[in-house]
């Protein structure tokens, strides 16, 4: 008999499609499930739920991979799943540079695959998925036929799974300094040294929302990273753009991107602490027509949410004080723990404290290559509001 896991699923969370089985849901085992191995999962009434990867060291004790109790989890399995994920991206019109596999939303928990032109970047962020890496790589070659694959398994979450951090080529080496296209802009991507998998692919629709509000505007892009919102503002007709980021390396890439697109005369960048910059700017009465706030995730876990909310509120309040009546605030959060309702409530509170009124112009989230699975709230993480500040 195969190893079995009996769990408490009285809330029907697993049966409805959420793949995470937490340690406090586990009732008992049958057999001797191995770390990273496959277990059959049953509910308290012995109803079959499917198969999952097992990890005794993780708070997420098992991650569901299929609802079929007997389906082989092999290279052919991963080829079918990745082929389905790629077919969906093609149908949505995302083929050049996009997220090919978005983990749980594509039925492949803890697996991320990003495509930059003809190369792939791979992340296996759970023990079971990491053990299946050879099968995954074989499937990726069969489905997408990439020129090369680079591993970016340097995310700290791997340590919670008992996994080491590592990066490097899977197979033959290739140049990791790439150039991709986004909304008509040319963007440098360093898949070996950039953040996450080398470039944030999830903001491109929100970047495009800068079209109308940027024309002839003075724009301040806070937490600019490699210049995403700033470059788009300049492309869409801003007369002056300043991007701020604490990272000298990110600012250097942003300047390089501006020069690559011929935008450097109107699009400048500065390395600075955004909190300090906005505080000083508001005290001095400096004003911009458009201010963008696209910070890194302040809430890495639920326990950090209260402090993160204070941080988000502070930068939004300071930004509103640097906008004239009728100016625009573009404010984002990429933390899954900062839900859309919490995010809106925080911005509203910042507006009250700044004695400003708000009109919503646009609300955006992730593009279709980062699909939101309704049974998995964690797949909804990105929020972007364009607000007119009155």
Image: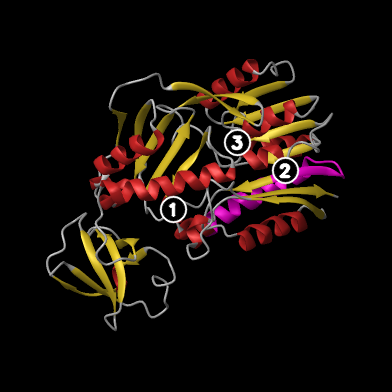
Report the label total: 3
- Distance between mark 2 and mark 1 Cα atoms: 37 Å
Which of the 4 image quadrants contains residue 260?
A: top right
Q: Circle 2 is placed at which residue position?
A: 319
User: Residue at image x 54%, y 59%?
Assistant: 306
User: Residue at image x 66%, y 34%?
Assistant: 229
Q: Circle 3 is placed at which residue position?
A: 223
* Most common secondary structure along the magenta stretch: helix
Q: Residues within 10 Å of mark 3 (few under 14, many from 20)?
A: many
Q: Are marks 2 and 3 in contact (CB under 8 Å)?
A: no
Query: Is 331 on the left-hand or right-hand side of 143?
Result: right
In the rendered image, the quadrant that contains the N terminus is: bottom left
Magenta highlight on residue 3 = no
Please determine whether, in this image, residue 373 is positioned above or below residue 329: below
Query: Is 97 on the left-hand or right-hand side of 63?
Result: right
Determine whether the residue tagged by mark 1 lies in a helix, strand or loop: helix
Please determine whether, in this image, residue 247 is positioned above or below residue 175: below
Residue closer to the observer: 12 or 200: 12
Q: Circle 1 is placed at which residue position?
A: 106
Residue closer to the observer: 343 or 258: 258
Please determine whether, in this image, residue 65 is positioned above or below residue 251: below
Q: Nearer the viewer, mark 2 or mark 1?
A: 1
Q: Which residues are the magenta region?
A: 306-330
Determine whether the residue tagged by mark 3 lies in a helix, strand or loop: loop
How far across and down, in percent of the image, does residue 104 sit? 42, 55
């Amino acid at each position: 008999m195969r190893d079995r896991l009996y769990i408490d699923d009285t809330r029907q969370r697993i049966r409805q499609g959420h793949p995470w089985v937490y340690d406090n849901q586990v009732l008992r085992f049958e057999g001797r499930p191995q770390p990273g191995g496959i277990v059959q999962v049953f509910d308290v009434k012995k109803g079959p739920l499917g198969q999952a990867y097992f990890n005794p060291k993780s708070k997420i004790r098992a991650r569901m991979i299929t609802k079929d109790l007997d389906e082989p989890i092999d290279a052919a399995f991963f080829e079918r799943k990745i082929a389905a994920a790629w077919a969906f991206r093609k149908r949505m019109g995302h083929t050049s540079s996009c997220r090919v596999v978005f983990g749980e939303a594509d039925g492949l928990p803890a697996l991320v695959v990003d495509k930059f032109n003809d190369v792939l970047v791979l992340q296996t962020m759970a023990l079971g998925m990491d053990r299946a890496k050879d099968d995954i790589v074989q499937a990726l070659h069969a489905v997408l036929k990439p020129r090369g694959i680079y591993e970016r398994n340097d995310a700290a979450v791997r340590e919670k799974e008992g996994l080491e951090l590592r990066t490097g080529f899977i197979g033959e080496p290739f140049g990791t300094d790439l150039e991709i296209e986004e909304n008509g802009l040319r963007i440098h991507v360093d898949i070996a040294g950039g953040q996450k998998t080398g470039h944030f692919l999830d903001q491109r629709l929100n970047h495009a929302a800068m079209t109308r509000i940027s024309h002839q505007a003075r724009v301040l892009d806070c937490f600019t990273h490699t210049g995403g919102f700033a470059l788009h503002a300049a492309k869409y007709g801003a007369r002056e753009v300043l991007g701020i980021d604490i990272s000298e390396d990110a600012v250097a890439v942003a300047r390089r991107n501006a020069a690559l697109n011929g935008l450097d005369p109107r699009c400048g960048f500065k390395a600075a602490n955004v909190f300090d910059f906005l505080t000083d700017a508001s005290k001095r009465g400096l004003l911009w027509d458009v201010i963008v706030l696209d910070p890194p995730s302040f809430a890495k876990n639920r326990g950090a949410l209260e402090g993160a909310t204070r941080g988000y509120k502070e930068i939004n309040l300071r930004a509103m004080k640097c906008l004239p009546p009728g100016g625009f605030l573009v404010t984002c959060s990429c933390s899954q723990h900062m839900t859309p309702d919490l995010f809106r409530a925080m911005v509203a509170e910042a507006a009250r404290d700044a004695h400003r009124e708000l009109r919503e112009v646009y609300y955006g989230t992730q593009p279709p290559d980062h699909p939101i699975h309704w049974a998995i709230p964690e797949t909804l993480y990105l929020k972007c509001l364009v607000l007119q500040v009155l």
